[in-house]
Image (cartoon, rainbow, N blue to C red):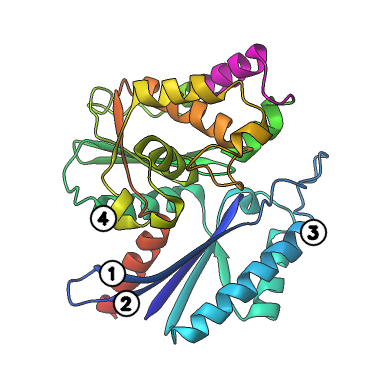
Amino acid sequence: VHASIDIGTHTARLLIARKCGIPGHLVPLARKRTYIRLAEDLSESENKDISSVAIDRTLDVLNNFSGALKRFKVHSVNAVATGVIREAPNGNQFMDRIYEETGIRVRVITGVEEAYLTAKGALQALDIHTDPFVVFDLGGGSTEFLIGSEGTRVARSIPLGAMILTKKYFGSDPPGEAEVEALSRHVDQCLLDADLNVPGAQDLPLLVGTGGTVATLAVMLHGIPLGDIDTDRINGLLLKRRKIESLFSEIRNLSLSARLKLPGLDKGRADVVLAGCLTVIRILYFFKSLQLNVSLSDLLEGILAESSKGEEND
């Protein structure tokens, strides 16, 4: 039994799985996801230290994860940190403290590593083995892309995250027209600047989306009860661009308290869903795509698949 952990900007997530006979194939035993909101208290100054409050929140969550690791008699744990932790000056002290207090050793991975591992988890789960494709992972602090076309692989991590964008662009609740337009322009410009144009990939594509926002949109648009969210139910669902746009039109003028009442939207996501939804729409337009394939399998599966490959090669 093996486990992977991702400590991201908005959430900490745990996957416990058993490897079966087929190389790289996993049988999930348990999943946990808790909101840790590391960007919430980021100091506004140049110093992007993660606050002590957010660190304590994360340690509580990881202690809870440790209990699950013991219950399932987990043989090995592969834990990574992503998002705002990459940039935080106190990131290394944070990782040291996690190890001291929980025994979990966490390594900070680059955006490029995250893009490859996420795509590995998603493509394997959706049984996609041919080019061209685009996999994007929209998180709280960044969005990772892996683009495959004609044998070429391009990985990018760009600073478009649902939580960071909400903090930066949406000062009023609900956001005003000018705020929505400013965020749209910013996302479009970031995508243009990111050099995502791979030969043959622009008119593709098979666009695969992962991350909390994409999963939330799948749950809301397909009417899935929050208790039924698992890979069997979510992986491979299609989200049409026009459906996402009409959902955005419906919810963009709702206050946070009104959004909290929407079916399928859990309360930890309600404050960042508008920025997340708008970012997904702009990504679809950028790649001239009318729909995306949803994958709940992502970085956590990719980490386990990669570590099992390492074991096979030992």
Q: Is residue 11 above or below residue 191?
A: below
Residue 120 seen from this side = no
Say whether marks 1 and 2 touch (CB < 8 Å).
Answer: yes
Task: Assess disc 2: are there few (<14), some (14-19) or many (≥20) residues with their C-alpha within 10 Å of its C-alpha.
Answer: some
Q: Which residue is mark 4?
A: 125
- Which residue position holds label 1? 26
| Residue 177 in which image quadrant | top right
Q: Alpha-carbon distance for marks 2 and 3?
A: 34 Å
The residue positioned 58% from the left and 49% from the top of the image is 83
- Between 194 and 227, the one lying in front of the other is 227
Q: Relative to residue 139, is residue 50 drawn left or right?
A: right
State how many labels appear: 4
Q: Is residue 250 above or below residue 134?
A: above
The answer to whether residue 165 is magenta is no
Kindly identify the amino acid type of the residue bearing the numbered disc 2.
Answer: Arg
Query: Residues in magenta?
Result: 172-190
Residue 69: give its label.
Answer: none
Residue situated in front as seen by the camera: 135 or 17: 17
Neighbours of disc 1 within 10 Å: few (<14), some (14-19), many (20+): many
- Return the residue at label 2: 18
Q: Is residue 67 visible?
A: yes
Amino acid type for the residue under numbered disc 1: Leu
The residues bearing labels 1 and 2 have C-alpha atoms spaced at a distance of: 6 Å
Task: Please tell me whether residue 180 belongs to the stretch shown in magenta.
Answer: yes
What residue sits 31% from the left and 66% below the top? Answer: 305
Rendered position, 291 above or below 313: above
